[in-house]
Image (cartoon, rainbow, N blue to C red):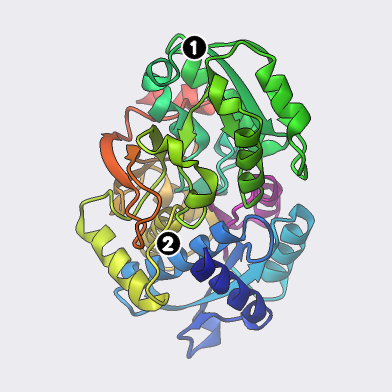
Amino acid sequence: MKRKLTIVLLLVLLVSSLTASVSMAQDDEDVLKIGLLTDFSSGLAVYGVELNNGFMLGLEYATDGSMEIAGRPVEVIVRDNGSDPDVTLEQARELITEEGVEILVGTVSSGATLGLQQLAADFDVILLAGPAAAPNITGENFNENTFRICRNTYQDFLTIAPLAEEIAGGTNFVQFAADYAFGTSSAAAAEFALESQGITFVRDTILVPLDATDFTPYLQEVLDTDADGLIVIWAGSTTINLLQQIGEMGVLDNITVLQAFNSNDFMPFLVPENLIGSLGWIVYHYTLPDNEINDWMVERHIEEYDGDVPDLFTECAFATAQALVAGVEATEGDTLPDVMVPALEGLEFDGPKGTYTIRAEDHQALVPMYLVRLTNLDDPEFRYYELVAEASAEDVAPPCVVEDRCEMMEDEG
């Protein structure tokens, strides 16, 4: 983890001066200013670095290195929000009203992103959500200004659901989730996906405060059930503490955890050795896609970031930049939602995981996902997995739940 944490620390030191992390501007009146809201300083900082790095490389790739879109020089203004919803709103407001930002990108926290959606609508700018995975961002909280190229947790659970009973050796499951937007909405997504495959949840989701450090009483509730399988919905650096306590309390002796594999630097701390050989799902790993765009991203990431390889959310940040460039090119440089929304709805393009399609109904991108087997935890190049299957974008498409809009567009289709 040293390499990525070093990058995090360097970015924390630099962020105060990142009012223009990339600028090829000669004519201020024509500059396209993009506000990148990310996290370099909280427990989600590793993901924030992935968002930053992937987005910058995606811009480079999509503009053929010119850093111009539709003839407009690009300036990316970066802010570290520490995944604090209030700070995120304050920064976004300042970016729009004082810096002249026309498009917002971010962030890694679902709670912060949900608040950011309303601000983007109020100021009438496009928001391209980052890795924040709560389904309600493109579901119940939908608004026309928000698009998400990254997956949501419906896609996670639809990937693993067909194998859930086989992996756990039974159909009785229990969930353990962080008590905030990401955890609660993801738990609902898991119930939808797994119940369609005959899984029964033996009790309500065990909700745990996000700032918890002692998980003992909540894990005891898990042990008090007769569940065959356990789904853990958590994120960030405290996941290490949680999984250590799962091991110490002997939870794995009684219940099988459905595995969601994480960022490379976290993996040796998150997964005990006795789970090598286990099946799980993963959003992205640099060794899995076989295409020229992924090859380019891997090579440039290694060159640009001190030999480090792309990680869990580098891919979707890269693809987010591709979508942004495609949308602004299609509108010939106009970033107003009235013209950008039609340009992005239904957009299909090739990215690091293959073909991405932005569903017009709810602005959620449909993307492939991966089933993998964990083979080791000590490869110096993080080659931890063998590919078991690639789940197609269509097979893991999340349900469209935006009232009226989904049904109306289906009828039109």
- For residue 409, side relative to residue 295 (left or right): right
x and y, in percent, of residue 208 in the image: 74, 33
x and y, in percent, of residue 156 in the image: 45, 34
**Residue 391 in magenta stretch:** no
**Residue 104 in magenta stretch:** yes
x and y, in percent, of residue 328 in the image: 42, 63
- Find disc 2 in the rendering and name its residue: 321
Q: Nearer the viewer, mark 2 or mark 1?
A: 1
The amino acid type, in three-letter code, at marker 1 is Ile
- Disc on res. 245: none
- In the depicted view, which residue is nearer to us: 175 or 402? 175
- In the depicted view, which residue is nearer to us: 194 or 107? 194
Up/down of 27 relative to 330, above or below: below
Q: Residue at x 51, y 67 (%)?
A: 4
- For residue 244, side relative to residue 333 (left or right): right
Q: Residue at x 43, y 53 (%)?
A: 316
- In the depicted view, which residue is nearer to us: 226 or 95? 226
x and y, in percent, of residue 42 in the image: 69, 59
Q: Magenta residues?
A: 103-131
Q: Residue at x 44, y 36 (%)?
A: 274
**Numbered disc 2: secondary structure:** helix
**Numbered disc 1: secondary structure:** loop
Contact flag, marks 2 and 1 (Cβ < 8 Å): no
Image quadrant of residue 102? bottom right
- For residue 295, side relative to residue 335 (left or right): left
- Find disc 1 in the rendering and name its residue: 199
Classed neighbour count for the residue bearing mark 1: other residues with Cα under 10 Å, few (<14), some (14–19), many (≥20): many
Q: Residue at x 36, y 60 (%)?
A: 326
The amino acid type, in three-letter code, at marker 2 is Ala
Q: Quadrant of the C terminus?
A: top left
User: Can residue 184 be seen by looking at this rendering?
Assistant: no
